[in-house]
Image (cartoon, grey):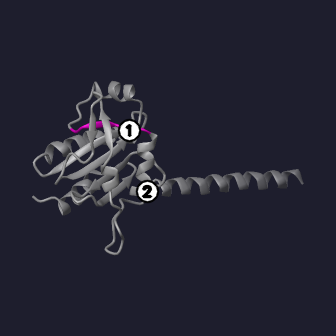
Amino acid sequence: MKISVLKIIVIAVIVGVIIEGVSIYRSLNYWGPHQHSQNEVSPSAIPFLQLNLKDLKGHSQALNQWPGKTLVINFWATWCEPCKEEMPMLSQLQNDLRDKQVQFVGIGVDEEKDLKAWLQTRSISYPILVGNDSTLEMTRALGNEQQGIPFTLVISPSGIVIYKKLGKVKEEDIKNILQKYVAS
């Protein structure tokens, strides 16, 4: 009798772990980038763009300081390996698209001292602003219900979210979406 109960418990634990793993995998949006259908209402980023965040020198920076530009906003942290892996690619894209009305912005949701220390040995070509848990919480309204990172948004000059991705972003996905919305 004890063997049967033990087998049932082991099977239940295994099934529970599998279900939780699939749930986490799906919640991280590994099924591909979010694409808006024509009938889907894209969330407005205008309230989010009213935020002022500090840069690494302590100066307040408005997210709406780049009018007329398509924004690529990437939420990251120094303890997040996929975040750190995608930053050189994002930095290169900023360099490549500098004359195309595109502005990349990084929002670090980490301790400011940790952000500064990590960035001292790296060359990132776009502004890094300091966020926090409440900044990340605001991304729920923009489609980041899990408040996970890395989380990348592409926001049109009119303030509409045209792309969102929870998880490591692919260069070709960013290039494809920007080609559709940015003049050559």
The residue nearer to you, when weighing 16 against 150, is: 150
Quadrant of the rendering where the N terminus is positioned: bottom right
Does 139 sit left or right of 89 as displayed?
right
Foreground residue among 146 and 88: 146
**At 78% from the left edge and 56% from the top edge, which residue is drawn?**
8
Residue 98 falls inside the magenta stretch: no
Tell me the SS state at disc 1. loop
Highlighted magenta segment, given as a residue range = 126-132
Q: Mark 1 is on which residue type?
A: Gly
Position above or below: 179 against 75: below
At a point 36% along the width and 71% down the height, the residue shown is 40
| Image vertical order of residue 173 relative to residue 106, above or below | below
Pointer 1 residue: 131
Amino acid under disc 2: Asn
- Could you say where residue 25 lies in the image, as x and y percent from the top left? 50, 54
Residue under numbered circle 2: 29
Mark 1 or mark 2: whose residue is earlier in sequence: 2
Rendering coords of residue 109 (x, y %): 40, 38
Q: Of all residues shown, which one is farthest toward the bottom? A: 39
Q: Is residue 143 visible?
A: no
Left or right: residue 34 versus residue 12 is: left
- Give the image quarter of residue 132: top left
Residue 130 part of the magenta-drawn span: yes
Q: CA distance from mark 1 to mark 2?
A: 22 Å
Q: Residue at point 39% right, 37% down?
A: 77
